[in-house]
């Protein structure tokens, strides 16, 4: 058990290929991942309006393996690797600088208790620490229904599955703090867009100046 904990804090093998290595990801795997950075910016129709959307990678091959690792296999330290990639990318960094607040897509408290963490919170918080005026807020948008996992459903069922599952916490207080600010919503992966759409729909209750979306992967 202690070994397992230590390995999570000080990993001794590459989190992707398993080769002995002093860092979480070996140089070979790093190079493979670097080659796949796209960093694409586009407009998307989400939450009943066009919003700016940016993502880093198409979700495939080696990246698919990583996401599943840090999400479900307790290789949580891998998230730091993506934070580094995000912050090092000039186009993405400039995008981040246009926002005042970064909000992670929340998970239900029961799920968080079970998993022990929400990887989106960890990533968004770390990003905010490294971008001067970007403020991290995980106390604005909350998830009030523990719905089925989107990936377990057919695409036509996904829209209904996320309907009304999010809520603004302390609406009046948060509205005063967030209105007229530029909000960046963060999720690790974009699939059908139903999750971010529903989050945007909910966030609009705060009357923000604008809402943008950042995800690491796009399916
Ligand atoms: Zn490796």
Image (tube, rainbow, N blue to C red):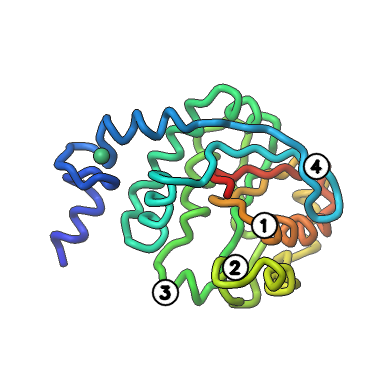
Q: Quarter for ligand 1?
A: top left
Q: Which-is-in-front pick, marks 2 and 4?
A: 2
What residue is disc 3 on? 114
Q: Residues within 10 Å of mark 2 (few under 14, many from 20)?
A: some
Q: Which-is-in-front pick, marks 1 and 3?
A: 1
Q: Residues within 10 Å of mark 1 (few under 14, many from 20)?
A: some
Label 3 secondary element? helix
Q: In this rendering, does residue 166 appear at all?
A: no
In the displayed structure, would residue 51 be above or below residue 70?
Answer: above
Residue located at (69% from left, 36% from top):
99
Tell me: is circle 4 under 8 Å from ligand 1: no
Horizontal side of 128 relative to 30 (left or right) equals right
Horizontal side of 76 relative to 152 (left or right) equals left
**How far across and down, in percent of the image, does residue 50 sit?**
83, 44
The disc at residue 192 is 1
Residue located at (41% from left, 69% from top):
115
What residue is disc 2 on? 150
What residue is disc 4 on? 210
């Amino acid at each position: 058990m202690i070994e397992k904990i230590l390995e999570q804090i000080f990993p001794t093998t590459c989190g992707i290929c398993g080769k002995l290595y002093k860092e979480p990801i070996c140089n070979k795997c790093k190079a493979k991942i670097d080659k796949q950075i796209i960093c694409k910016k586009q407009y998307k129709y989400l939450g009943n309006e066009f919003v700016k959307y940016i993502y880093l990678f198409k979700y495939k091959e080696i990246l698919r393996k990583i996401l599943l690792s840090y999400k479900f296999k307790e290789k949580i330290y891998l998230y730091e690797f993506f934070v580094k990639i995000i912050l090092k990318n000039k186009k993405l960094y400039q995008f981040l600088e246009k926002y005042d607040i970064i909000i992670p897509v929340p998970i239900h408290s029961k799920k968080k208790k079970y998993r022990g963490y929400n990887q989106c919170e960890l990533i968004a918080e770390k990003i905010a620490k490294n971008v001067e005026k970007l403020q991290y807020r995980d106390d604005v948008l909350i998830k009030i229904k523990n719905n089925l996992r989107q990936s377990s459903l057919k695409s036509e069922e996904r829209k209904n599955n996320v309907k009304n599952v999010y809520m603004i916490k302390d609406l009046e207080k948060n509205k005063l703090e967030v209105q007229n600010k530029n909000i960046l919503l963060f999720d690790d992966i974009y699939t059908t867009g139903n999750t971010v759409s529903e989050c945007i729909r909910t966030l609009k209750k705060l009357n923000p100046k604008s809402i943008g979306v950042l995800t690491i992967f796009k399916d």
